[in-house]
Amino acid sequence: FLRFIVEQTLQGKSGALDERVIGVEVYGLNPDYDPRSDPTVRQEAHKLRSRLRRYYAGAGRRDAIVIELHRGAYAPVLALAGKRFSRRTLARLGGAGVLGAAAAAAVWVVRFAPRPLRAIVVMPFLNLDSSTEIEYLGEGLSAEIIRGLSGINDLRVIPRASASAMKEKRRDVPEIGLRFKVDTVAGGAVRTAGDKLQITANLVRVSDQRQLWSRVYDKERKEIFAIQEEITRSLARALGVKLVTRAAKGHPAHPEAYDLYLRGLYFWENWQPEATQKALALFEQAMAKDPSFAPAYVGAACSYQRLIDLSLPGTLPPAAAHSKWKAAAGKALELDPSLPEAHATLGVYQSRMYQWQASESRFRQALQLDPNHVWARRWYGAWFLGRVGRTEDGISEIRRSLDLDPLSAAGAAALAAALLEAGRYDEAEEWCHKVFELDPNFAPGRWILGRTYVLMGRYAEGIERLAGAEKQMGAQISPWLAYAYARSGQAAEASRILDRMLAAGPESITAAAPAIVYAGLGSSDQAFEWLEKAYQEHALNPRLPELAGLRRDPRFTALLRKMGLW
């Protein structure tokens, strides 16, 4: 505020200083905002006057130049040794005189203005409606603001998963600041009334819980994207950082596309197959509504990726999912090459296609665009480094993603899985328990813990966990449970699940599933028959510890060679 009004005055533009100009240029308000209904500038001017009085009564009492801001005015008055400069005098002084005044003002700003803020957590926006129908709006709004602020080199932004985990603590700013080691907390609330939308947003400094910025938006619901962008810009200004502008082509031309996209994000955060399928349908609707909206294609690509990773019968035929996954990620990059998540999901796809060099290049591009991108770093560790045998490097990358996103159950599960593949079962078990501390209902964590128990020889515990995961996720012919039965000596039960698996047909399972069960049963010939099919359909992960008994077989080496891993 002070810097802007002093610079404008020194440039001879003090006559144009009013609430509207300051609101737009300093606080990022819309040009059409009404100062009579929004007191932001008046409130901040009052704070600035108080701060100037305190400064010149203390540390600045001997300053050669005094800056005054009179009540009801927005043009500052500059005084030298008790003599005020008029606008005419300022204009006459020119050259050295103006530079001297400017230098003095700059010294004040540099020495005594608050330092730029460098770390922020954006909490999910509260739903103030009695219905949960708009819950997705608050969650999606915070997610998109986080995405908008990410990639700024001088700013650390806490990822969405960790912010959501502290949702119930939103009023306890000091606790949130301590937990995430941030100096600012942003958030707000959402309320609807028919086609109207009211959104409040604010930014609070942790050290003294002072509100640095706030705004109330009363808009049409169709303006949600514009509101999100304005909040993001205003937060960047208040934080003293320069916002990285995304490619304009990535913006939705149709407001319904953005609404559908936010709904999709809400369901995508739930790892249940049914929720992921809902998310995919919503992303595809957004793509149809606005074919130029790049984030919707990223959402679709990530949904295809998730459904294949879950490897559950009936979710999506792998062959069809692969081609749609590649097409969606490619289209997103064509529309907006600046989206790190688009590069990252394409990197995962290329890893599955055994295109290792291309995969690493994509992950590096994603991390160059945003070094703090959690998905990119996590997937780089799991899908490239882990797959090519750089196990410890992969674990380190996943740990770095957890440093960025410490309260993410998915991140903790990814680390547990990487430790499991490395044969570090005790550590994998420890991290599985951390998963449940973060989210007791996170089903992939049950699977990883069940597999860990089986590989540790704790078969009864492993079977119990895996059966619970199957029930939670709606799966009935999981290879992991069949493998557990096989290893525990219950071959008949394992064969029963295997028969159902084979009867379901190739459209319902990946070829890797029977291979895992046959490996557990000790039937190496059948296992390699299915591993070859898994290689052909790009469903083979040779690092699975369940396949450890086959690794000395020359046929396993031959598979690795064909995959480019030998």
Image (cartoon, grey):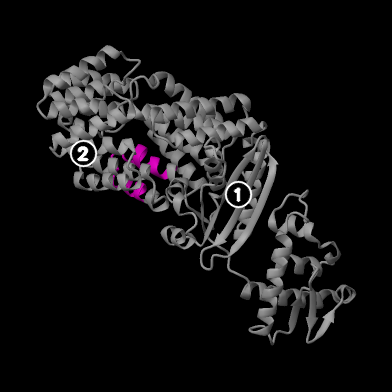
Q: Quadrant of residue 224?
A: top right
Name the chief secondary structure element in magenta. helix
Instruction: Find residue 39 and report its horizontal and vertical position in percent.
Output: 72, 59
Instruction: Find residue 284 and report its horizontal and vertical position in percent.
Output: 54, 25
Residue 60, compared with residue 278, is above or below; it is: below
Q: Which residue is at a point 21% across and 45% down the rendered structure image? A: 424
Q: Is residue 207 left or right of residue 21?
A: left
Q: Amino acid at mark 1?
A: Val
Q: Amino acid at mark 2?
A: Thr
Q: Is residue 213 left or right of residue 538?
A: right
Residue wearing tag 1: 244
Q: Quadrant of residue 503?
A: top left
Residue 528: numbered disc: none
Instruction: Find residue 562 and report its horizontal and vertical position in percent.
Output: 29, 26
Q: Quadrant of residue 90?
A: bottom right
Residue 522, compared with residue 192, is above or below; it is: above
Q: Which residue is at a point 56% across and 39% down the rendered structure image? A: 137
Mark 1 or mark 2: which is in front?
A: 2
Q: Which residue is at a point 69% across and 53% down the rendered structure image? A: 28
Q: Could you tell me which quadrant the N terminus lies in?
A: bottom right
Check disc 1 and report its element: helix, strand or loop.
loop
- Label 1 CA crowd tier, 10 Å (few <14, some 14–19, many 20+): some
Residue 452: numbered disc: 2
Read off the magenta span. Answer: 376-399
Task: Assess whether residue 465 is covered by the magenta stretch.
Answer: no
Q: Which residue is at a point 63% across and 28% down the rendered structure image? A: 290
Q: Nearer the viewer, residue 150 or 137?
A: 137
Decide if residue 422 is in sight here: yes
Q: Could you tell me which quadrant the C terminus lies in?
A: top left
- Label 2 CA crowd tier, 10 Å (few <14, some 14–19, many 20+): many
Q: CA distance from mark 1 to mark 2?
A: 43 Å
Check disc 2 and report its element: helix, strand or loop.
helix
